[in-house]
Amino acid sequence: MHRLVVAFVALSFAGVAASAEEACIKYHKCISVDAFKCDTVTRSTAIHRVCYLETERYMVLWFKRRDGGSSEPYHFCYNERIGGSRNRHGPFDCRDHPIPSL
């Protein structure tokens, strides 16, 4: 949860539009992140890069590896009932929440 808060804060301060970038989401498919607000995160020990599509409330995160490199991207889906939601896999897991068709 702390990682997601860090990602949201990073986006609110320094969002930069990506150009011609694709993210091949772990366990999903490759998507274009051209319409996302993306930023490289420098103030986190866990997150390397974050992209957020506000209209869909959809986030893609690249976590840092132990060797300092970037991992494969993972996606997070927002749930309207997040405050009281008790889903099987967690409040942001795309297995329990709809993945936007991009």
Image (cartoon, rainbow, N blue to C red):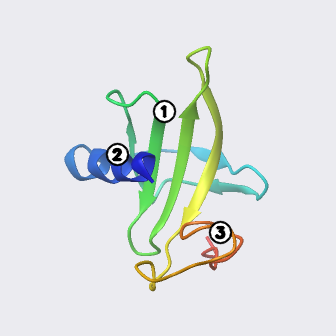
Three-letter code for the amino acid on which mark 1 is drawn: Ala
* Amino acid type at image mark 2: Val
Q: Position of residue 11 (x, y in %)?
A: 30, 50
Q: Nearer the viewer, residue 52 or 102?
A: 52
Q: CA gap, disc 2 to disc 3?
A: 19 Å
Q: Which mark is residue 11?
A: none
Circle 2 sits on which residue? 6
Q: Callout 2: few (<14), some (14-19), or many (20+) C-alpha neighbours within 10 Å?
A: some
Image quadrant containing the C terminus: bottom right
In this picture, is 99 found above or below 35?
Answer: below
Of 3 and 102, which appears nearest the observer?
Answer: 3
Residue 16: where, in percent of width, then height?
A: 32, 44
Q: Label 3, secondary structure: give it.
A: loop
Q: Quadrant of residue 43?
A: top left
Earlier residue among tags 1 and 2:
2
Left or right: 48, with 86 as reference point: left
The residue drawn where x is 61% and y is 19% is: 66
Q: Residue at x 47, y 36 (%)?
A: 47
Looking at the rendered structure, the kind of residue marked 3 is Cys
Q: Alpha-carbon distance for marks 1 and 2?
A: 9 Å
Question: Do callouts 3 and 1 mark residues in contact (Cβ within 8 Å)?
Answer: no
Q: Residues within 10 Å of mark 1 (few under 14, many from 20)?
A: some
Does residue 33 appear in the picture of this structure? yes
Badge 1 is on which residue? 46
Query: Front-most of 41 and 93?
Result: 93
- The residue positioned farthest toward the left in the image shown: 13
Residue 16 appears in the picture as rendered: no
Q: Does residue 48 sit above or below 83 in this rendering?
A: above
Q: Residue at x 69, y 74 (%)?
A: 88
**Image quadrant where residue 27 sits:** bottom right
Callout 1 touching callout 2 (CB < 8 Å): yes
Residue tagged 3: 94
